[in-house]
């Protein structure tokens, strides 16, 4: 995904995509913390999915002008 969006895409739409990406990230974190990810994914597949989810959330945050979240310790 490039670091800019088409001129026809409003800031409001970019913000909504960012919100959706953050909800998806929260869902994957919850899957990890509860251990339920093991029902749906193999370990390598889950790690790859999580990497993509985090990358997309950070990209939409950058596009929307929102600060990116620091990794949890």
Image: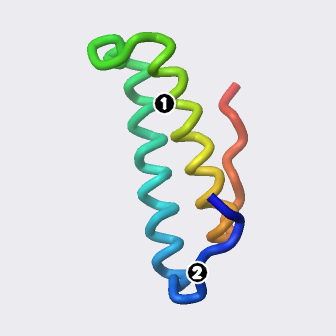
Farthest residue, direction left: 39
Mark 2 or mark 1: which is in front?
2
Q: How is the image coloured?
A: rainbow
Residue, disc 2: 6
State the residue position of label 1: 49
Q: CA distance from mark 2 to mark 1?
A: 26 Å
With 10 as the anchor, is 66 left or right in this view? right
| SS at badge 2 | loop
Give coordinates of residue 71: x percent, y percent.
69, 34
Identify the element where label 1 is drawn: helix
Q: Is residue 29 left or right of residue 38?
A: right
Q: Where is residue 50 shown, x and y percent of the image?
A: 52, 30
Q: As displayed, is residue 11 above or below residue 30?
A: below
**Viewer-proximal residue, 30 or 9?**
9
**x 71%, y 65%: residue:** 3
* Residue appearing at x 50%, y 14% in the figure: 44
- Circles 2 and 1, Cβ within 8 Å, touching? The answer is no
The image quadrant of residue 62 is: bottom right
């Amino acid at each position: 995904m490039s670091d800019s969006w088409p001129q026809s895409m409003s800031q409001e739409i970019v913000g909504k995509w960012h919100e959706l990406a953050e909800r998806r990230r929260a869902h994957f974190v919850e899957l990890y913390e509860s251990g339920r990810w093991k029902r749906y994914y193999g370990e390598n597949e889950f790690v790859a999915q999580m990497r993509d989810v985090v990358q997309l959330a950070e990209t939409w945050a950058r596009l929307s002008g929102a600060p990116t979240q620091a990794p949890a310790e």
